[in-house]
Image: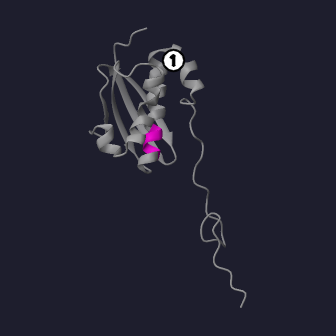
């Protein structure tokens, strides 16, 4: 099944949200108007974003235009990775078992724990003074 038009997908991680448009192309990835390495600045985050493309052998098959906001660069990279994986499944349902096996379709549910009263942060306490 070959895709003729754009496919839209979203991904979230921590406080970050990624919106992604995918279309047939030459493997170009753009994040907020920049290349992934230019935007994230760390090669391990770029590899994390490209992981769904590597396991499905589609590194040069599609162009991606991504918009990310919120959180930090690590969360944004995770959100973009999820969006890419979801877009690939929309394009070709045969990729689902491969991406599922690699854990790329699972949304990481961990979020910040709320602050409790009487404490400095969620678990950190104020310094105890015996006298």
Q: Is residue 15 above or below residue 81?
A: below
Q: Which quadrant of the figure has residue 62? A: top left
Q: Label 1, on which residue?
A: 95
Q: Please give the range of residues in magenta.
A: 75-79
Q: Main secondary structure of the magenta part?
A: helix
Is 95 above or below relative to 64? above
Horizontally, residue 92 falls left or right of residue 64, namely right
> Farthest residue toward the right?
130
User: For the point 29% across and 19% down, which residue is it?
Assistant: 25
Q: Who's the residue at 27% across and 39% down the image? A: 34
Look at the image and name its color scheme. one colour
Q: Nearer the viewer, residue 64 or 43?
A: 43
Mark 1 Cα within 10 Å, few/some/many (few <14, many 20+)? some
Whether residue 59 is visible to the viewer of this picture, yes or no, is yes
Could one spot residue 87 in this view of the protein? no
- In this rendering, position of residue 129 left or right of residue 112: right
Find out whether residue 88 is within the magenta segment: no
| Location of residue 57 by image quarter | top left
Percent position of residue 123, x then y: 65, 64
Give 9 or 49, whichever is nearer the viewer.
49
- Is 127 left or right of 26, judged from the image as shown? right
Which residue lies most toward the bottom here?
A: 131
Q: Residue at x 39, y 10 (%)?
A: 2
Residue at image location 29% in from the left, 43% down from the top: 38
Residue that protrudes farthest toward the left in the picture: 33
């Amino acid at each position: 099944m070959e895709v003729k038009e754009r496919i839209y997908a979203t991904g979230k991680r921590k406080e970050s949200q990624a919106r992604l448009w995918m279309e047939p192309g030459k493997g170009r990835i753009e994040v907020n108007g920049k290349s992934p390495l230019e935007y994230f600045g760390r090669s391990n985050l770029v590899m994390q974003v490209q992981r769904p493309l590597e396991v499905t052998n589609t590194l040069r098959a599609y162009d991606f235009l991504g918009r990310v906001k919120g959180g930090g660069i690590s969360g944004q990279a995770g959100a973009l990775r999820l969006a890419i994986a979801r877009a690939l499944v929309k394009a070709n349902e045969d990729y689902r078992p491969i991406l599922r096996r690699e854990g790329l379709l699972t949304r990481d549910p961990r979020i910040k724990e709320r602050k409790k009263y009487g404490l400095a942060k969620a678990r950190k306490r104020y310094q105890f003074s015996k006298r």
